Amino acid sequence: MAGEYRFSFGPWNIHEGADPFGPTVRDSVEFGKKLKLYKQLGFDGVQFHDDDAVPGMDDLSPEQIIKKAEQVHSMLEGEGLVAEFVAPRLWEGGLTIDGTYTSNDPACRDYARQRSRRMLDITAALDCKLVVLWLAREGTYIREAKDSKVAVERIVEAINDMLAYNPDVKIAIEPKPNEPMDQAYIPTAGHAVALSYLTDAPQRVGVNIETAHVILAGLDPSDEMGFALAYDKLFTVHLNDQNGLKFDQDKAFGSVDLRRAFNQVRILDQYDYGTRGEFVGLDVKAMRTQKQDVATKHLSNSRAIFLRLLELVRSLDKDKVQKLINERDYEELDLLTINHLMGR
Ligand code: XUL
Ligand code: MN
């Protein structure tokens, strides 16, 4: 069964374990060494932030950026890997404190536009056709700080600029309702899909559904996936897990709520996710307590849980399920599902 789905993660998913209350607890793993781990762990795709590929890109010329990205592309080829997507890391710089595309300061908006174009140069150099936009700082801490109508128009304008600059890419918006902002402008799949129809090329703008982000919005991840699938806009996923409404945890897939994870795998498999080249993307973090030499288990475990759940999805007695739906006996369907998850 493994091999039917291709899996990806980002280099940031192997990390040093710092949190807002304490420093790093593990050594950094050099990028080249991380790449060597992908195949060993069962992964074929690399998710990139622009500066994962080209560190310090703000201090480099466009030509230097492209050259460096081409070198990274050769490294990927050497490992038999492909770049799944590139995302602009727009939330760390001094010019993006008050937002990027929605900043009130035109100089900051201009920086965001230029940086996004460089990100698209990197995408092309990596022979990659997908961009992910997590709109980290496009929101407010207080409602009075920005105009929410203008903010949406500015996001559309920025996306149109990207669509025109690199006509080969599709753009997947990764909705998240909060963190770092109090309120984000594009918090759910519904917002992202609606926004896509304001752009110049709606068919090229879709979504990346992340489990944890959906839970933070108080919604169900498999339903958000179904919504995006109904619009043919589920360009990729960020599977992980989340224990209630708190900070974004990025826990291993299925580690909190197996049934919720089962339903995500179920909707993906039911609608042939992956057959148009989509990756099963993870966005997971190792626990801070994890020691250096075993700090990739969250990745291999998430993949293994997905594949085990896939077996359960496919072995579920579909006739029985349909019969119970026909009879409207959802109590029995509940038990059937739980028993199935418990291996009975
Ligand atoms: C943030 C998040 C990001 C995006 C990529 O919560 O999930 O890592 O996935 O920018
Ligand atoms: Mn993510």
Image (cartoon, rainbow, N blue to C red):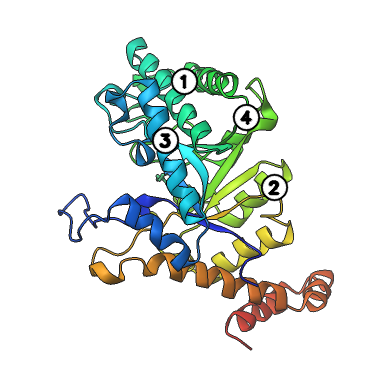
Of residues 164 and 262, the one drawn nearer to the viewer in this rendering:
164
Q: Is residue 78 above or below residue 61?
A: below
Q: Secondary structure at mark 2?
A: helix
From the image, tell me which residue sits under label 4.
168
Residue at 62%, 29% in the rendered image: 168
As drawn, the label of residue 69 is 3
Of residues 156 and 161, the one drawn nearer to the viewer in this rendering:
161
Q: How far is disc 1 from disc 3 in space, using C-alphas?
A: 31 Å
From the image, tell me which residue sits under label 2.
229
Residue at 24%, 57% in the rendered image: 17
Q: Residue 203 in the image: x percent, y percent?
A: 70, 31
Q: Is residue 308 visible?
A: yes
Mark 2 vs 4: CB contact within 8 A: no
Left or right of 220 in this view: 332: right
Between disc 1 and disc 3, whose residue precedes? 3
Left or right of 330 in this view: 52: left
Mark 3 vs 4: CB contact within 8 A: no
From the image, tell me which residue sits under label 1.
151
Q: Which amino acid, by three-letter code, is at mark 1?
A: Ala
Q: Quadrant of the C terminus?
A: bottom right
Q: How far is disc 1 from disc 2 in space, using C-alphas?
A: 26 Å
Q: Nearer the viewer, mark 2 or mark 4?
A: 4
Residue at 24%, 67% in the rendered image: 292
Q: How far is disc 2 from disc 4 in space, using C-alphas?
A: 22 Å
Q: Which amino acid, by three-letter code, is at mark 2?
A: Leu
Mark 1 vs 2: CB contact within 8 A: no
